Image (spheres, coloured by chain):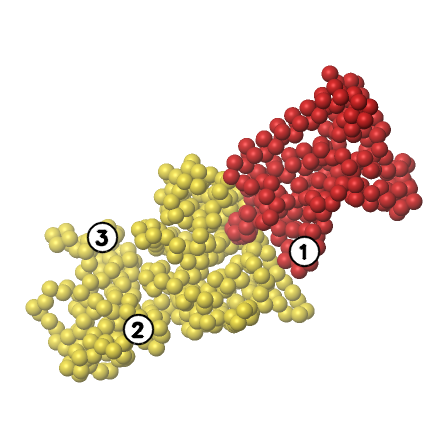
Amino acid sequence: MTLDIKLTSSVNDFDLNIDLSLNTSKVTAIFGPSGSGKTSLLRAIAGLGNRKNASISFNGEVWQNHSADNRVFVPSYKRKLAYVFQEPSLFEHLSVMVNIEYGAKRVSADQEGISPEEAIESLSLAKLLQRDVNTLSGGERQRVAIARALCSKPRVLLMDEPLAALDDASKKEILKMLVTLRHQLNIPIIYVSHSIDEVARLADDVVLLERGSVVTSGSVQSILTQLDLSLAHDSDAESIVDAVVAAHDDEFGLTYLDSKVGRFSVLRREFGQGEKVRVMVSAKDVSVTLNRQRDTSILNIFPAVITEVKEAGPSHVTLKLDANEVVVLASVTKKSAAIMRLEVGTSVYLQAKSVALL
Amino acid sequence: MFSEADLVALLLTLKLAGISTLALLVFGTPLAWWLANSQWRFRFLIEAMVALPLVLPPTVLGFYLLVSFSPTSFLGQMFEAVFGQPLAFSFTGLVLGSVIYSLPFVIQPLQNAFVAIGTRPLEVAASLGASPIDRFCSIVVPLARPGFLSAMILGFAHTLGEFGVVLMIGGNIPGETQVASIAIYQHVESLELASAHWLSAALLLISFSLLMIVYAANPKARVLRWSR
């Protein structure tokens, strides 16, 4: 997918000035604090609401053009996209099943994409099909909304903080489904969020928005670990390591994952051998030693080199570590950094007390 | 009980109310939709005009209609040129008058229902590939069904109760413009109180039954609330 967007608008002291070119078939997260223009950007892509001063083209097809001599506006229903809103916004006069089929009935049969049956399966909706939508819980409603969007066989799926309004349990459950769906779907997803956790789990690329303009964009691994960005010195800064399931260890109940960093040991999880997974390492859970510790209970220990040191608050520094070309962040106290003389170029061993497998 | 003339008047009333309601639905639905969605800064002008029959004495409305229906007026001449008969004191004239007279009773429930739906379901439907007409049929109409029912019944019932306007523009031609309310007035004038009782009771019963349906169908909705 190539999506070129130029967007300028100025409403109530809020200036939007976005010039963005997305070139991906995967998941792009639009990340930023509230009021940064994420939703405005997504709505402009979808062709919803006020026609802002925008030029948008999708795979060379002009969706919107604002130049004086050649005005184009392709209405939303002709863009062949789907939009999942923060509120599920189900059609309350229709049953779950008819909601799911709404988009499917309005798309030509030869359009490639997921069938209602597959969507129902992926989002575990089989038991809800005959229910009145008004009796569903928030999480169930959002699952139906996602299935409904997928069944319209969109060429691009737009999601506007679909989990933000849900309770933690539903959030976790749906996030897991989305992570799985990400691999099944062959369509690009543009996912608006202000949760680092969701971005780290789902996104391949990240566009960082602040006060109506793009601050930076790039792969999720690089954006999350760029120390000059707000994301990386946040208390919940994380790094992402791509890995492949190598083996299971039944004796100790562990699963081994191979990555460029080295072999991770994680609690046993039901993944097939060779399956690609994402390991999330929280900066808080990483400590460093100058020598390889032998007498430690920590299993995940890897050699690395410090490439950057950045102050993070009154007592801590964040270390950017290069572990065989993979970036891992570590949060250590200023005192430890001083005692150990941690500086750029120092070779260390990183110890990850716990890692999350996505 | 009912004399033949009374029956004719009663049937004419029902026919007038039926045709007027149908016309109101056809023209009122797009108008109500526009009023519910328009961002036009002078929309209030149209809203005030639509609401006028709520407050205006029917005789005032009837007087202006009578003037514009007269064979010397533009509308009157146009109508006579096309249909070969005058508009004043005709059934068609009554339908036209009733449509204007009952307009707010159809527009306001519809407009309220449309506003209550909001833009979100329509945005969702658009993103799922539904064209504007498709969205109106598959989302707006079913979601606004109580509003449509109220609009129909209120428009119908209000037209049944029309008196002043008919008196001004319809006159009293049996089978053409003599509706039940006029016939009742005639009976009372001629002291035929028994006939007046029967016709009045008939109108009362019909109107009450209709309103009952409105309120039963909208247990929670505030059908007869005009403010939004």
| SS label for mark 2 | loop
Mark number, residue A269: 3
| Protein chain holding label 1 | B
> Nearer the observer, disc 1 or disc 3?
1
Front-most of A59 and A141? Answer: A141
Q: Which residue is mark 1?
A: B43
Front residue of A33/A105: it is A33
Vertical relation: A182 (above or below) A13: above
Residue at 71% of width from left, 45% of height from top? B55
Q: CA distance from mark 1 to mark 2?
A: 52 Å
Instruction: Name the image quarter holding residue A356.
Output: bottom left
Q: Nearer the viewer, mark 2 or mark 3?
A: 2
- Dot 2 or dot 3: first in sequence order is 2
- Which residue is pictured at 59% across the width and 62% down the height? A51
Give how far apart the Cα atoms at labels 2 and 3 are.
30 Å
Does residue A142 sit above or below A127 in this rendering? below
Residue at 78 percent of width and 18 percent of height: B3
Task: Identify residue type, mark 1.
Answer: Arg
What residue is disc 2 on?
A233
Front: mark 1 or 2: 1
User: Picture coordinates of residue B4 (x, y %)?
Assistant: 79, 18
Q: Chain of mark 2?
A: A
Residue A278 in which image quadrant: bottom left
Would you identify the image quadrant in which residue B207 lies?
top right
> How far apart are the alpha carbons under marks 1 and 3?
62 Å
Chain A, colour shown: yellow
Element at label 1: helix
